[in-house]
Image (cartoon, rainbow, N blue to C red):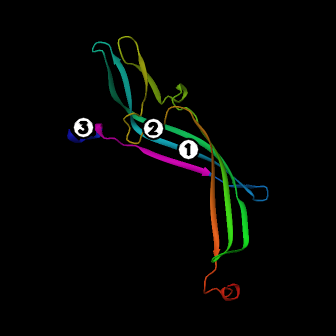
Amino acid sequence: PRFEEALKQMQSGIKHSIPLSTIVKLSKGRINVTPSLNYEEWWYTKTTLRSWDSANKKVTETAQSGFTRASTYRGSISASTNIYGTFTGLKWGPVRALRHVITPTAYLNYRPDFSRPKYRYYRSVQTDSAGKSETYSVFRNAALGGPGSGKEGSLNFSIAQVLMAKVLKSTDSTAKTQN
């Protein structure tokens, strides 16, 4: 009996992800475009069902057994390039040259709303005698979570900069002739 009870209360699940991406070089390799798609899937043997108990005026929650799977996907695309600047012939102490690299990158991300009825990952339950209701995930008590609600979309822009200096060392073969 204890083993059977432990099995009933056990939280288990499997989650796997498949990330796909590639790099496409445009304009003779000056611009890198990276489209990507990420697919995630959860496997569970239980889901959560909530219902309104009108006799006791409260929401009851029960675990429903049976294999259930849920999946999500998101897509993104980014584009970046490098802009180079070189300054030579400098004599700032031991500094003889500077190289400046600027990398602007634009990102676009999108994930659909997995709480929409067609996915069947979210349900509504009455929460009071007045008929008020709320939406909940059938994976709310799952060990590994489940698909998120709400649509996601973003457009981001970043700039990375690197400044490098060529520093003359006393051990360089040209150090004696340039001092």
Q: Amino acid at mark 2?
A: Gly
Q: Residue furthest right?
A: 28
- Between the C-alphas of marks 3 and 1, the distance is 34 Å
The residue pinned by badge 2 equals 146
Q: Amino acid at mark 3?
A: Glu
The secondary structure type at the circle numbered 1 is strand
- Which numbered circle lies on residue 134? none
- Which numbered circle lies on residue 39? 1
Measuring 52% from the left and 43% from the top, which residue is drawn there?
40
Name the quadrant of the C terminus.
Answer: bottom right
Q: Earlier in the sequence, mark 3 or mark 1?
A: 3
Q: Are marks 1 and 2 in contact (CB under 8 Å)?
A: no
The secondary structure type at the circle numbered 3 is helix
| 91, 32: nearer the viewer | 91
Name the quadrant of the N terminus.
Answer: top left
Q: Are marks 3 and 1 in contact (CB under 8 Å)?
A: no
Q: Earlier in the sequence, mark 1 or mark 2?
A: 1
Measuring 64% from the left and 80% from the top, which residue is drawn there?
168
Measuring 33% from the left and 26% from the top, which residue is drawn there?
61
**Percent position of residue 178, x then y:** 70, 84
What span is colored magenta in the figure? 8-20
Mark 1 neighbour density, 10 Å: few (under 14) some (14–19) many (20 or more): some
In the image, is residue 16 part of the stretch drawn in magenta?
Answer: yes
| 143, 100: nearer the viewer | 100
The secondary structure type at the circle numbered 2 is loop
- Between the C-alphas of marks 1 and 2, the distance is 13 Å
